[in-house]
Amino acid sequence: MKVKEILELALLFLNKEELLAYSPFGDETTLPTLEQTEIEHLKKCFNLVYNEIAMSYLPLVKTEDVVFINGVLAYDKLSKNITEIRKLYANGKNIPYSLEEDGIHANILCAQITYNYAPAELSFEDEVFLFGGKLPERVLAYGIAMEYCLICGLYDDAEVWETRFYSGLRDATLKKSEIRLPSRRWI
């Protein structure tokens, strides 16, 4: 699903269907200044909400093979913007490491690293990773509606969307387990 499709859903929630006629949603390419500002605010709201979810609730995880040069792996050598190391291992064993200003220090040449990362800022045509299907797109749209209402000073409306957003996040982050009934005992 693309960013603009989630923003379309948020616009429906906000009763701002008139913005759907303008680019990037519709065919009209000449945007009045007010509408262009609102659409840009919506994109910023999307990135704020997406970043909050990825950093606090459903982390984005990446695993990659890395090479340490003189015992140091520079942060910019990783493909994503790292926020937390989950595991550094080689040959099936965890490798001790330390975090320094210049990078990750470890006494090894090659290893595999698993880490959480911050999402890059997305634009209208970018595909959205929905956290392995754990997060419905409507929850993202609730968060966008919440942030948009806060920006516009509509605090009562923001409270309604906030309740829906955090309720949806709670449902998405709960571990789903089997329901087991206790076995019956026969005398």
Image (cartoon, rainbow, N blue to C red):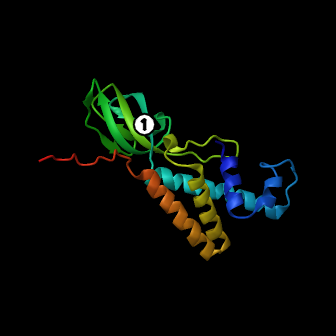
Please, is residue 54 above or below residue 63 in the view?
below
Q: Is residue 53 left or right of residue 9?
A: left
Residue, x 37% and y 33% (percent of image)? Answer: 113
Q: Amino acid at mark 1?
A: Ala
Please state the horizontal and vertical placement of residue 48, each as a whole percent of the image: 57, 57
Please, is residue 79 above or below residue 145 in the view?
above
Please state the horizontal and vertical placement of residue 33, each as a whole percent of the image: 83, 62
Q: Is residue 41 visible?
A: no
| Quarter residue 72 falls in | top left
For disc 1, the marked residue is 74
Q: Quadrant of the N terminus?
A: top right
Please state the horizontal and vertical placement of residue 45, each as a whole percent of the image: 62, 59
Decide: few, some or many residues near mark 1? Use Cα within 10 Å; few <14, some 14-19, many ≥20: some
Residue, x 80% and y 64% (percent of image)? Answer: 34
Residue, x 46% and y 51% (percent of image)? Answer: 172
Residue, x 40% and y 52% (percent of image)? Answer: 174
Q: Is residue 148 visible?
A: yes
Q: Is residue 57 left or right of residue 151?
A: left
Local SS, label 1: loop
In this view, the residue farthest toward the left is 187
Please state the horizontal and vertical placement of residue 135, each as a whole percent of the image: 52, 48
Q: Which of 59 and 176 lies nearest the eye of the viewer?
A: 176
